Amino acid sequence: MAAVDAQRRPAMRWAVVAAVAVLAVVLAAGGALLVTRDGLDEQLGRRVVAALERPDADLNAGDDQHAGHDPASGATRRVSPDGHELRCATEVFGHEPVDATSVEEVTVVYAHRMCAAVGPGLVWPDSIRETGPVAVRLGIPDTLVLPERSLLDDPDANYVERIRSVVPQPFRDAALAFRDYVDPDVAQDLQDLVED
């Protein structure tokens, strides 16, 4: 019996070593994928912020009187209807295609957004001007798709229906995850940005 156990020990050691090696490779690959995904979401988040803050952001298609819509104004950021520059923060919760690994492969980004007016006399949280999910179609330029600008032909549509019209099924739970459509992490990031 002892002779059989002595013969199995080297085989068991090799099996354990092989299992540990496989596990290490899987963890390393998973970690690399996670780092890549975090990096991609950060890059996409910066694109969403840039689109939201762009002075010629087309937020009200067909309404050329919208504040911040006049690219000839020389503004470096979009402005609120009361004339203050807007600063925005975002948190990406999805993108298409879902298996994209680089910004170049992504066609649409879904994110929680919050924008606040900045300037003298404005204080948090009274400076908040926009909040909620947004879709951004990547291109030149990137195009904002806001729930509040969807389903305009249906005056009875509520905000949840408008979100559902902009955000496809795989991402809807994330889009609707927060009370009042405010991601607390995005709110904190924006507050830090505005108060600095």
Image (spheres, rainbow, N blue to C red):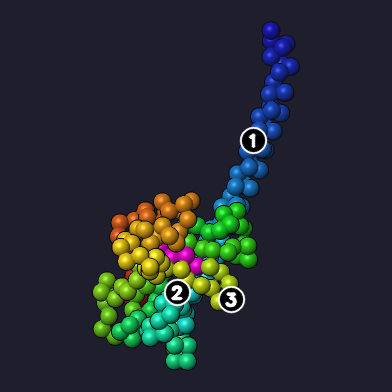
Mark 1 or 2, which is nearer the eye? Answer: 2
Gap in angstroms between the C-alphas marked 1 and 2? 47 Å
Of the numbered discs 1 and 2, the one sitting upstream in the chain is: 1
Q: Main secondary structure of the magenta part?
A: strand
What's the CA distance linking mark 3 and mark 2?
A: 14 Å
For residue 93, which numbered disc appears in the image?
A: none
The residue under label 2 is 52
Percent position of residue 31, x then y? 58, 50
Q: Report the number of discs.
A: 3
Amino acid on which the number 3 mark rests in the picture: Ile
Residue designated by label 3: 140
Looking at the rendering, the stretch of residues picked out in magenta corresponds to 132-136
Q: What x and y, as percent, mark residue 32?
A: 61, 52
Using the rendered view, name the quadrant where residue 159 is placed. bottom left
Residue 44 vs residue 1, the one in the foreground: 44
Residue 134 covered by magenta stretch = yes
